[in-house]
Image: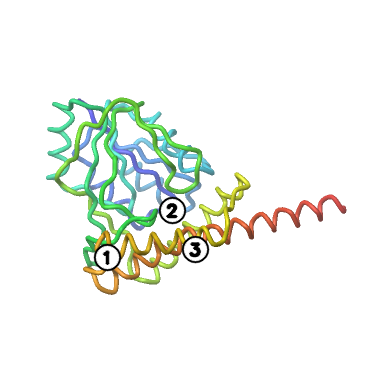
């Protein structure tokens, strides 16, 4: 069974070299370079990767373009800030050779700086388990900019043991910047649908997400970082809602100015 590794990247020159080096145990590496202005494309080509260049407004479009370029029967999805160990590579090889299903979930170890943070992830702000390994053609994405919903054909093949190493944030400042980025993209998705939601619904949703991440998912075990992650997960729906309303107001104002001219 041939396995392709797929990386979708936007200006990831600082991370991509180590990422693709960790993928050399696979039959093919595909890098989708989305509007890159740094050395991302050059690094990918030097590593022998198939490079797909383009401008993609939606994450789902990037994924679809990448899967279309993959030659392997199975595809492993990796982000530029993630690494795949030799042990995980060997487990993937063995798993696809005897798979009784069409997609596997893979554990994810999330690092903030050099600290492994095991608890509290969730609420669209991080995950400790993801369906990253699938047969080509068996995975489909919703039309969204960030963390698009996924639908699978076929049946689950199980859960692997070895984890992807995810260097998600450098520090708390990086975490806050990621929250700002994610909530803006989510706000654009909501504005495009004309469905920003209601303020207090999102306040309560944010509180529930914080509670779930901090208490149910044991974010409290990881101290300050666990609290910060839970807080970011709780703020995400509220900020997305407020930004969607702001975007809709800005679009309405721009439309009124255009009509007046």
Residue drawn at the location 14% of the way across and 44% of the way down: 161
Question: Can you identify the residue that label 2 sits on?
Answer: 11
Label 3 vs 2, first from the N-terminus: 2
Whole-angstrom CA distance, mark 3 to mark 1, is 20 Å
Indicate the position of residue 122 as horizontal and vertical percent values: 33, 55
- For label 3, the crowd category at 10 Å Cα-Cα, with few meaning under 14, some 14 to 19 and many 20 or more, is some
Mark drawn on residue 219: 1
In-front residue for pair 93/220: 220
**What residue lies at 26% left-to-right and 52% top-to-bottom?**
128
Q: Which residue is tagged 3?
A: 203
CB atoms of marks 1 and 2 within 8 Å:
no
**Vertical placement of 137 versus 215: above or below?**
above
Q: Residue furthest bottom?
A: 224
Residue depicted at x 21% and y 63%? 116
Dot 2: few (<14), some (14–19), or many (≥20) neighbours within 10 Å?
A: some
As measured in the structure, the alpha-carbon distance from the residue carrying label 3 to the one carrying label 2 is 34 Å
- Say which of marks 3 and 2 sits in front: 3
Residue 251: x %, y % from top left: 70, 53
């Amino acid at each position: 069974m041939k396995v392709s590794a797929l990386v979708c990247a936007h200006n990831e020159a600082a991370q991509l070299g180590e990422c693709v080096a960790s993928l050399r145990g696979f039959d093919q590496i595909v890098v989708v370079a989305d509007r890159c202005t740094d050395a991302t494309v050059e690094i990918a080509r030097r590593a022998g990767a198939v490079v797909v260049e383009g401008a993609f407004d939606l994450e789902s479009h990037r994924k679809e373009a990448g899967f279309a370029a993959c030659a392997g029967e199975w595809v492993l999805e990796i982000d530029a800030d993630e690494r795949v160990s030799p042990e995980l590579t060997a487990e993937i090889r063995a798993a696809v050779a005897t798979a009784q299903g069409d997609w596997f979930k893979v554990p994810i170890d999330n690092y903030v700086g050099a600290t492994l943070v095991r608890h509290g992830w969730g609420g669209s702000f991080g995950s400790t388990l993801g369906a990253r390994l699938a047969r080509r053609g068996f995975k489909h994405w919703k039309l969204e900019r960030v963390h698009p919903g996924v639908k699978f054909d076929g049946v689950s093949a199980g859960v692997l043991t070895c984890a992807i190493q995810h260097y998600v944030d450098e520090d708390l400042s990086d975490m806050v910047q990621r929250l700002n980025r994610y909530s803006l993209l989510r706000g654009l998705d909501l504005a495009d649908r004309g469905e920003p939601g209601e303020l207090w619904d999102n306040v309560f949703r944010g509180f529930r997400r914080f509670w779930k991440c901090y208490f149910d998912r044991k974010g409290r075990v990881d101290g300050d970082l666990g609290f910060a992650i839970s807080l970011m997960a709780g703020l995400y729906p509220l900020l997305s809602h407020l930004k969607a309303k702001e975007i809709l107001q800005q679009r309405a104002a721009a439309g009124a100015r255009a009509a007046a001219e």
